Image (cartoon, grey):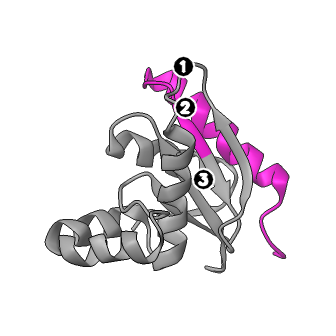
């Protein structure tokens, strides 16, 4: 595979938002980034909070930056908050270590990008991110 297409990124976002509606979750924002941290697709559900796009981006960007799904980052942040405060400073505030940031891989393990979801509880954000990635036929690495 040569990379994540905008069609695949759109499929991930649309599947995640649809699944969130089916589950009755709060309005979400979903963003998909390429491996360099640049947005491919961002959608904000009607009624989603105004900071949700930035939070979703920070979750995805943090996963890319650390090379781990947000669940790993969240566990590490709990054990070593000073280190993750330093990461926030080093990244100029662009990183969020929280569930809802999921790496996107192909069937061979190649990193294609990351998805970030924000708007509900972190476990729910992560669940819809994983659903979207898998619905697109790719591998979700949540950590």
Residue located at (67% from left, 47% from top): 12
Q: Earlier in the sequence, mark 3 or mark 2?
A: 2
Q: Which residue is tagged 2?
A: 19
Q: Is residue 6 magenta?
A: yes
Q: Which residue is tagged 1?
A: 47
User: Where in the figure is residue 132, as x and y percent of width and height?
Assistant: 60, 46
Q: Which residues are magenta?
A: 1-30
Q: Residues within 10 Å of mark 2 (few under 14, many from 20)?
A: some
**Disc 3 to disc 2, how far (Cα)?**
12 Å
Please tell me the numbered disc located at residue 130. Answer: none
Which element type, helix, strand or loop, lies under badge 2? helix
User: Where in the figure is residue 84, as x and y percent of width and height?
Assistant: 29, 72
Q: Is residue 17 magenta?
A: yes
Of badges 3 and 1, the one in the foreground is 1
**Disc 2 to disc 1, how far (Cα)?**
16 Å
Q: Earlier in the sequence, mark 2 or mark 1?
A: 2
User: Mark 2–mark 1 contact, CB under 8 Å?
Assistant: no
Q: Residues within 10 Å of mark 1 (few under 14, many from 20)?
A: few
Of badges 2 and 1, the one in the foreground is 1
Q: Quadrant of the C terminus?
A: bottom left
Name the dominant secondary structure of the magenta segment: helix
Residue located at (50% from left, 57% from top): 58
Q: Is residue 92 above or below residue 15?
A: below
Q: Which residue is tagged 3?
A: 134
**Disc 3 to disc 1, how far (Cα)?**
26 Å
Seen from this angle, which residue lies furthest left?
Answer: 79
Closer to us: 14 or 84: 84
Closer to us: 24 or 100: 100
Which element type, helix, strand or loop, lies under badge 3? helix
Residue 105 is drawn in which quadrant? bottom right
User: Mark 3–mark 2 contact, CB under 8 Å?
Assistant: no
């Amino acid at each position: 595979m040569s990379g994540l297409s905008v069609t695949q990124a759109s499929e991930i976002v649309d599947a995640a938002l649809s699944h969130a509606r089916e589950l009755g979750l709060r309005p979400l924002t979903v963003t998909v980034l390429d491996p360099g941290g640049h947005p491919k697709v961002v959608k904000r559900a009607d009624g989603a909070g105004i900071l949700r796009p930035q939070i979703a981006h920070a979750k995805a960007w943090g996963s890319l930056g650390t090379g781990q799904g947000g669940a790993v980052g969240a566990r590490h942040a709990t054990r070593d908050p000073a280190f993750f405060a330093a990461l926030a400073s080093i990244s100029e505030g662009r990183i969020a270590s929280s569930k809802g940031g999921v790496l996107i891989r192909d069937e061979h393990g190649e990193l294609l990008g990351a998805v970030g979801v924000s708007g509900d509880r972190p476990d729910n954000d992560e669940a819809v991110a994983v659903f979207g990635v898998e619905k697109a036929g790719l591998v979700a690495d949540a950590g």
